[in-house]
Amino acid sequence: MSDSKSKPRRTGIAQPALQAALTDAATDPVRRAMWLDALEQQLRPCLPPALAPHCRLANVAGKRLVFIVDSPVWNARLRLAAPELINVAQSIGLAVTEVTAKTRPAPVVKPAQAAVVPVSEASRRGLQAALDLLSAPDSAGTPTPQGGHRGRRKN
């Protein structure tokens, strides 16, 4: 039998997400993420237009700019754009000397989601009328199945 004990649960009122994110213990990671996002916005215009949607600044680690790309092809194209990225980063005060890329299989940019269009009352009534017709009894008085056909279909 093991001597492991479960950790006691903390009691108290849960803080709102934003308030918890901005507490002193969590401020540094949040500020760093915001800084990285602002830095990416400054570097993004320097990327070739075909490359920009396929890469994202992930970190500044020492003297390296670290990007995430979606395939090895974009990794190679990022290496070609590295000198200009380094020049721009140095011009805004970063002491970077190289660019590296990590490849991940999923696309970096989320695809746009389809907009949900609410159904109008007229459309709702029309659909209900169509459903009612499908379940209406046939000339013999028996209700037809959902598909509107009884028995086998003739070809």
Image (cartoon, grey):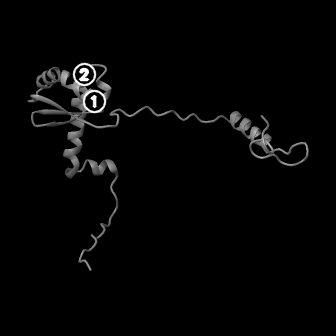
- Identify the residue at image location x=73%, y=37%: 125
Marks 2,1: beta carbons within 8 A: yes
Pinpoint residue 19: horizontal percent, then vertical percent.
Answer: 30, 50
Q: Amino acid at mark 1?
A: Cys
Q: Is residue 49 above or below residue 110?
A: above
Q: Nearer the viewer, residue 117 or 23?
A: 117
Image quarter of residue 15: bottom left
Q: Nearer the viewer, residue 10 or 112?
A: 112
**Where does label 2 land, which residue?**
47
Identify the element where label 1 is drawn: strand
Q: Residue 46: tell me if it is visible.
A: yes
Residue extending farthest to the right is 140
Mark seen at residue 55: 1
Image quarter of residue 91: top left
Residue extending farthest to the front is 155
- Identify the residue at image location x=23%, y=39%: 33
Q: Amino acid at mark 2?
A: Leu
Q: Nearer the viewer, residue 95 or 146?
A: 146
Q: Is residue 76 above or below residue 126?
A: above
* Left or right position of 155 against 82: right
Identify the element where label 2 is drawn: loop
* Left or right position of 155 against 39: right
Image quarter of residue 104: top left
